[in-house]
Image (cartoon, rainbow, N blue to C red):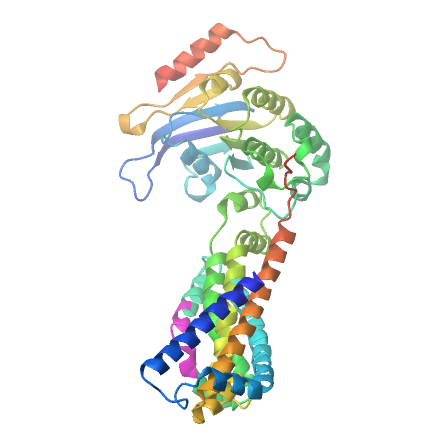
Amino acid sequence: MLYRRIFQFLIVYIFGILFLLIIKFIFSLSDYVIPNILLIIETAAQVFKEYFFDVINTLSVTILGQCISICMAFFVGISGRKSSWIGSFIKVTAYNIQAYPIVALAPIIFILIGDGFISRLLIASMICYFPLLLSVLGIMATPVKDIEHFYIITGQMKWHLEVKIRIFENLSKLTTVISGSATLAMAGTIVAEFIAANAGIGYSIRIALYQSNLAKILIALFLIGIIISVYQGILEVIGEQIKSKWSISKKGTIL
Amino acid sequence: MHLKCKNLNFLYPDSKSAVINNLSFSMKNPGFNAIFGPSGVGKTSLAKIIVNKNNCFNENIITKNINIILYSYNLERLPGWLNLGKHINKVISPEKLHLKKTLIKIFELNNVLDSRFSNLSMGQQNRINLIRYLLQDFDVLIMDESLANVDEKLKGTIILAIKELFPDKMFLYISHNLMEVSKFCHKILVLGNPSQNKPCFIINGQNYKKKCFLDKKKLNITMLEIMNAL
């Protein structure tokens, strides 16, 4: 799964580079607009180490932001799962707020908190929080009737058992959503860094943009893509491990 | 113990014709009774109404000496994170452990207690589901196709064992099997199709018990009565 993700990214990246090179040749563009392969390799040798640590810096904020958003999404999802007044209120509020683009709120966060770690973390967690919340709310608010019936009718249903049943029955969906939200968290962090931070790969991309250095941007994109693929792959592997451990069963053997 | 239904009408919100139309019947004393009828006549709806009588049907469903009514059906599942043995132990009180052992032996489920629910056949799934209901406190247990996909011989053994082990409980057995219902049940509520204006009847079944003689002629008459009532 991990190798497949990296392989898929490499294919997309190579196609992207080829596309740029084709445009360069068709319109006879200079290296200043679209760099040639040699220039890209030369730039990679210069900035690879620096950009790698920048991506790791961004990734650390991404992971933290994602953890915060997962906790928040589960807290609100579990609180809003009931069809009571408060449950409906939480659901409607969540649906309405998520319609507002968080990136548009980013400048307010920077004005209030200033550029730095907290602003990046806040924007990263907010960007991946709402899609995550909608999935978690959907899963938590949908009863698994054929399992829950027994506990309800015999009076043995507790809130944590209800949550456990719904999580267990939707484990694949949750794993996919959490792994997918990693991309959103990364995008959120990079956007935050791009707007006004003073560290991370988004900040480096902004500097490269001011220098009109496409080679640097391509190297940054390569590192972001590779590292997010590895991170997502690891999340999927962890999800698979949890699934197989939790629902381990004795399979029959063919004699 | 008395379960009485008086002038019950039931219509689904998105439907024009009533599923249950002016239904009245009465079932007294513990025992194995049945609700019988073709698909779509409202057997499951009636079962759910009886279970949820306190919500909207307090005036139509009247009970005496009945406190707990449970409803089990054949599509239920057990959670997948525990094996069957551990799951059953978690949902029963310690004093029922001996009864659990007895039931597992009769239901022929000894070999699958270490397995997960998803690894069982459909018949085994229905049997383990029924066991966990039988191990709860109840006065009336509605068994909606709870023994579907179980072979006829084992089904007979299970029904006879339930009658023997739970003599003071009332069972409402919902099935499409005419022979089974006629043979094992005491009172059989035959639901006619309300769209054809067919009335409902209570027919006496053979109420066959262990070590009792089964009069095949009477059994045939019961089956004919049910067929005529439909």
Q: Residue furthest bottom?
A: A211
Query: Is B93 rendered above or below residue B187?
Result: below
Dominant secondary structure, magenta? helix
Q: Nearer the viewer, residue B95 or A174?
A: A174
Q: Residue at x 65, y 53 (%)?
A: A245
Q: In the picture, which quadrant includes the N terminus of chain A? A: bottom right
Q: Is residue A40 left or right of residue B165?
A: left
Magenta stretch, residue numbers:
A95-105
Q: Position of residue A218 (x, y in %)?
A: 47, 81
Q: Nearer the viewer, residue A201 or B208?
A: A201
Residue B139 in the magenta stretch? The answer is: no
Q: Nearer the viewer, residue A4 or B195?
A: A4
- Locate residue A58: give its quadrant: bottom right
Q: Residue at x 46, y 39 (%)?
A: B53
Is residue A197 among what the camera can see?
Answer: yes
Q: Residue at x 53, y 87 (%)?
A: A42
Is residue A111 among what the camera can see?
Answer: no
Q: How many marks?
A: 0
Residue A101 in the magenta stretch? The answer is: yes
Q: Position of residue B59 (x, y in %)?
A: 41, 37
Query: Is B182 rendered above or below residue A254?
Result: above
- Locate residue A155: give its quadrant: top right
Q: Position of residue B161 (x, y in %)?
A: 63, 22
Q: In the picture, which quadrant includes the C terminus of chain A? A: top right
Query: Is A120 rendered above or below residue B111?
Result: below
Q: Position of residue A114 (x, y in %)?
A: 52, 91
